[in-house]
Image (cartoon, helix red, strand yellow):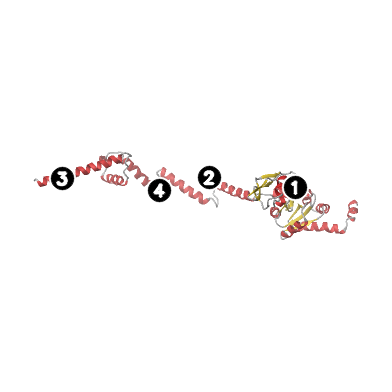
Amino acid sequence: MDAEHHSMHIPQHKKDEIEDIKTKIGQYSVVGLVGIHGMPSKQFQQMRSSIRDSVLIKVSKNSLITRALNECSEDVKSLENYLDHETGLVFSNDNSFKLFRLLESSKTPAPIKGGMKAPKDITVEKSPTNFPPGPIIGELQSAGIPAAIEGGKVVIRETKVVAKKGEVVSHNLAAMLARLEIFPLELGLVLRGTFEDGMLFDASKLAIDEGKISLDFTTAASQAFNLAVNSAYPTRTTIQTLLAKAASESRNLAVNAVIYESGVMDILLSKAQGHVMALAGLVSDEALDDDLKAKMGAQAAVSPVEVEPGEEKTAGKAEEEAAEEETEESVAEGLGALFG
């Protein structure tokens, strides 16, 4: 009775609002709650327009959102845990991860106001400015920004963190940051949580590093392939590598075990010939037949003669002495022929 009596005092437009929320929850595969606190109306309308093809945004009072959720299933009702301050509803047929990425990419930088807490470390980089010399130098310095005049221009002398995360930004610093076109804030819808296919997703679980995930998949695939090959596990992906590995290992086994097979006979014969030639080089020439001598001679002719350092001069001298002896012999033979 109390519930009925209470519902009778709800204005019709609020009942219609509740029913509209419930209808949209049933129409879309994903419903989420976003924070809209402190977002200017102009930026909000621009953002709503930019993503309207993928996301429907509905702003309503928290009390009406709570009532609509309570009249839905128990799973959807759990979304009310994300109701806080100014809240909006988002509806989409994209999955929760795409919705999160879309809302994050639609955020725009904005200047910070005096009295607000820095959302992150605010850094002013060392660089020249467009300001002409004048009172601006004192204003920058009073805001904690190291400024000076160089070459007739105002410059930031060094890179400096002018406000750490969580610190209150002074009005003077906020004004100087705006003039330097440093915008520490990001204006946009802050997704708190979504409900999809019977599951509740906290926004912290939706913020994934796509590059890392892709690298993890690649690494996992590579490790799985190596494991399958090393454990000889045949699959459509590994069978070609396994067959090539098996063929190579069987060939090596046949060669080392001297198994006479057509696939390795050329290797075995070449290996045997090498052993024969090595052995022939260890025995005297008298123990070799003519065929081996000829092969040893051919091998020696092909092999380059190595001259030890310091012997080059000796070899050259020997050639000169041989030439001189040859000349002397020729002269002797000529005289002998002349005198009979």
- Work out whether residue 331 can be spotted: yes
Q: Nearer the viewer, residue 183 or 135?
A: 135
- Residue that carries the numbered disc 2 in the rendered image: 230
Closer mark to the observer between disc 3 and disc 1: 1
Instruction: Identify residue for label 4.
Output: 264
Check disc 1: other Cα within 10 Å, few if <14, some if 14-19, many if 20+.
some
Q: Which residue is denoted by mark 1 in the rendering?
A: 172
- Tell which circle, 4 or 2, labels the residue nearer the N-terminal end: 2
How many badges with numbers are in the image? 4
Q: Amino acid at mark 1?
A: Asn
Q: Residue at x 48, y 47 (%)?
A: 246
Earlier-in-chain disc, 3 versus 4: 4
Q: Tell me if mark 3 has few (under 14), some (14-19) or many (20+) residues whose alpha carbon lies within 10 angstroms of its own.
A: few
Give the image location of residue 328, x and y in percent: 17, 43
Select label 2 or label 3 by which is in front.
3
Residue 23 location (% of width, % of height): 79, 58
Q: On the image, numbered disc 3 is attached to which residue?
A: 331
Q: Is residue 90 above or below residue 303?
A: below
Q: Position of residue 148 (x, y in %)?
A: 66, 47
Pointer 2 with pointer 1, Cβ within 8 A: no
Q: Amino acid at mark 3?
A: Val
**248 sits left or right of 97 in the view:** left
230 relative to 84 in the view: left or right: left
Mark 3–mark 1 CB contact (< 8 Å)? no
Q: Label 1's element?
A: helix
Q: Name the residue type under label 2.
A: Asn
> Is residue 184 visible in the rendered structure shown here?
no
Where residue 218 is drawn, which disc sits there? Answer: none
